[in-house]
Image (tube, grey):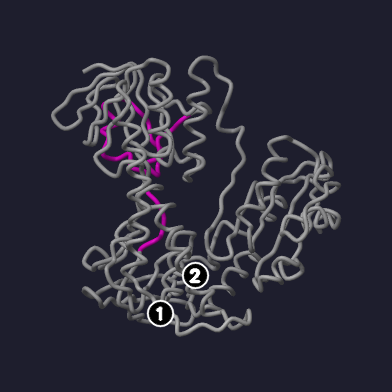
Amino acid sequence: MRYDALIIGTGQAGFPLAAALSKRGETVAICDGGFIGGTCVNVGCSPTKTLVASARVAHMARRAADFGVTVGEVSIDFARVMKRQKDIVKKFNRGVKDQLTQDEKITLYRKNATFIDAHTVKVGKEILEANRIYINTGARATLPDIAGLKDVPYLTNVSILDLKDLPKHLIVLGGGYIGLEFAQIFRRLGSKVTVIHRGAQILDREDADMAQIAHDVLIGEGIRIVTSATTERVEGKKQSVRVHIKTSKGTEVIQGSHLLVATGRTPNSDALALDKAGVQVDQRGSITVDDELRTNVPHIWALGDVNGRGAFTHTSYNDYEIVEANLDTPTRKVTDRHMVYAVYVDPPLARVGMNEKEARDSGRKVLMATKPMKNIARAQERDETAGLIKILVDAETEQFLGAVVFGIGGDEVIHSIIDLMYARAPYTVMKNAVHIHPTVSELLPTTLADLKPLE
């Protein structure tokens, strides 16, 4: 079969691109032997944020007395918690599947694709050809080279969502955003949790003060965090694992019931037979793309996590937007976008652009202002005062360089700054604005009034 366009993968770039090409009158084949809708819908954002919500309810119920509310003993129905996230995933998954199967110009193939040549792929027993090919195969959990790991029943971000029973003691390898989100979720649901991280601080991409706040929040909830730790080997069986670590204090064996591996992500490029199409990848396995997401083969593009240019749902969707906008006349490019993301520990950490270290290293004249969440009325009223706002501004252009809002509502508040950065507006636009009281956002203008040169 020959199509105008072939899309490999149904993730957050793949399925909207299929719909857009169909509206242009093109015939589209889209192939996926895994989850329809990709990581976010099935084993990423949707299920995990649903679990975050359940865990937060349990956490706040235990804190009811702090607000003058009396409740009975808080118990967890783990089966219902897990069913709730599964039900939401099914709903979202069904929506994507319906969109793909109800469009007469789109043909969905429920098998994975491998290249035969630059215009041809094999999908099951089918041979498909296309004028243009778009790769959107995502990424998977990285399996680190640790002795014994392959011989124990470890969990990943995918398999942990299928647990039937609440872990008695969950050991988490990795102190990045995936590991910490699950650590807090399961601690709040009632598990004992230990996080083991190789780096000197959790959340390696963040400034030390932000990482320390997250560290304090998590240990305050009873999570043990071991940093600067080398995992030498693991052993054990179902419901009983032992992790041998080495730190500056010596060696230790940590005994747990379950082991979650959250040490990074690997692009799903290795099973595509890209060499037969002549498509290049980098040392990590990410498909190399230009500013318009085109590979070194002019009629093949790579979108989403597999290209290593974002690794978030929102960047994957933006990849689709860039490719769709450039179908006729190139007008958009990857380097036009700002780096934005949130870490969904509770409270959330949201960031745009540079952090303080990056600003210092940039050689620019930088202004910085901070505001502790404990000084914000909304945070005090809700008794959720952990966190910090940090804003960085170019002293010469007066434009924002970056910001972190770590605290209650941070994942929403950050967008006020994101939009001004895209508008290339000076910080004075926000500084002179009137914001609504009582909100977290109302403190952004007053924070900017305290801008001072970095020392």
Q: Position of residue 140 (x, y in %)?
A: 35, 49
Q: Position of residue 355 (x, y in %)?
A: 66, 53
Residue in front for this viewpoint, 227 or 31: 31
- Asked whether, in this view, residue 436 is left or right of residue 200, the answer is right
The secondary structure type at the circle numbered 2 is helix
Q: Decide: few, some or many residues near mark 1? Use Cα within 10 Å; few <14, some 14-19, many ≥20.
A: few
Prevailing secondary structure class for the magenta stretch in the rendered image? loop
Residue at x 49% of width, y 75% of height: 225
Going 51% across and 42% down the picture, which residue do you hit?
314
Tell me residue 381's x, y (percent). Answer: 70, 71
Q: Quadrant of residue 134?
A: top left
Q: Which residue is mark 1?
A: 75
Residue 3 lies in what quarter of the image?
top left
Quadrant of image for the N terminus? top left
Looking at the image, is 278 positioned above or below residue 404? above
Residue 57: mark: 2
At label 1, the amino acid type is Ser
